[in-house]
Image: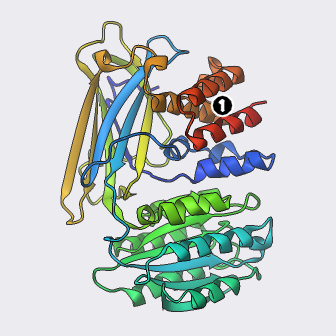
Amino acid sequence: MTDPASDPLSTFALDIDTGSYTRFRDAVNQGRRIAPSEVRTEEFVNYFEQGYQAPREGLDVSIDAAPLPFREGHRLVRVGIRSANADHESRPDADLVLVVDCSGSMGEAGKMDTTKAALRTLATSLRPTDRVAMVCYSTEADVALEPTPAADRLAIDRAIDSLHPQESTNAAAGLALGYDLARSMHTEGRMSRVVLVSDGVANVGDTTPGGILDRISAQARAGTNLISVGVGIEDYNDHLLEQLADRGDGWHVYVDTSAEAERVFATGLTGSLVVTARDAKAQVEFDPAQVAAYRLLGYENRAVADRDFRNDAIDGGEVFAGHATTALYDVELREGARDASFVKATVRYLDASGRPVERSRQLSDAECAPSIEHASPRLQQDLVVAMLTDRLTGGPWTQWTRPDDLRQRAAAVTASLDSDRDVAELVGLIDRATT
């Protein structure tokens, strides 16, 4: 816990990734576990509907809170940030370069089959005026599809069908060629995106994350965003794929099923392409007179120095259209805190013109729900998710909670959100992961 008397500000770059949760789901469904280092609370929370109202433009921020049921005097504070929606028909045309890992490891456990299914879903969801190119990399990188109108489905399908596992993994060469193609396709007024599909294993060429990431950062500054798509439960480099998305000003997903591919590349395609806010950061301020201590749940690798919150030269996170991201805090209040605001959340981002925009909200204890049972169902849902990630990582809440507590609370949330299939699935995963 952090004492606000010495550090009242919590500052971080926004993150809309969801890959950590879907990788956990895939592991449980295969009777496996993921390493604690692969559990990122914010990505678990991001996967679920939050019920935030979409602003007309840019980003907006909200705050709510409720008592933590297992810690007297503590509140679970939820800072929610929502981006404006974008219409699929009115979005700019897109130029996509698909960079596909065709190394030998992609022949394991259906990885290539999952990859091909995801790419077909993506291709089907594009508009005829979009364009697609494809790079396949193994020991070397080659162009599998020259820039092609999305209307030419036959050519795209043939390129996808031609993909097959080969030899070693030169991810650096594949990405370099992919970004070269993206630059050659650049046309004013069109969106440029690189979509990497891989298990993240790099074993020839530049295999260090630092070397690859430096190249990605330079391309991101030029306006080409990276979407990293992870596949395969075995031989998987979670750290590299997550960091590639962060440094590439994009986002990271993990595709474990055809339904997940549909969610990302069909239903949510526009939200996978259109950037609503660039270099977005959040700063949450706690009043030392009312707050004894606080702890941010997650965002461990997204921290920003407090002094750099308004420094637009410091990289933040890109937020795509129709997305929500949530920061949860465990906050210990001092006795007597009630009417004055004890927390203020501010989000800062650059709009489409490059102009900085800020939005803020405050919350007092009097505005908090009287109990977690009286809080919104979505806040109750987020408590369950946070309890799960705390247990998966051996976090501090395990001192006060048992697996039975988590399962019972998860079952109660299902009753409130009985039409939400994602929540119902979560309950089943919790049962299997904690028994």
Q: x%, y% of residue 371?
A: 45, 15
Q: Residue at x 52, y 86 (%)?
A: 133
The one of 165 and 217 positioned closer to us in this rendering: 165
Q: Residue furthest front?
A: 419
Q: Residue at x 61, y 58 (%)?
A: 260
Q: Residue at x 50, y 80 (%)?
A: 97
The one of 122 and 364 positioned closer to us in this rendering: 122
Mark 1 residue element? helix
Mark 1 crowdedness (10 Å alpha carbons): few <14, some 14-19, many ≥20 = many
- Which of the 4 quarters of the picture holds residue 338? top left
Q: x%, y% of residue 173?
A: 59, 82
Which quarter of the rendered picture does the C terminus lie within? top right
In the figure, 300 relative to 332: above or below?
Answer: below
Q: Amino acid at mark 1?
A: Arg
Q: Residue at x 31, y 58 (%)?
A: 277
The one of 378 and 27 positioned closer to us in this rendering: 378
Q: x%, y% of residue 421?
A: 60, 43
Q: Which residue is mark 1?
A: 391
- Which of the 4 quarters of the picture holds residue 156? bottom right
In the figure, 347 relative to 209: above or below?
Answer: above
Q: Can residue 186 be seen from the camera position used here?
A: yes
The one of 5 and 81 positioned closer to us in this rendering: 81
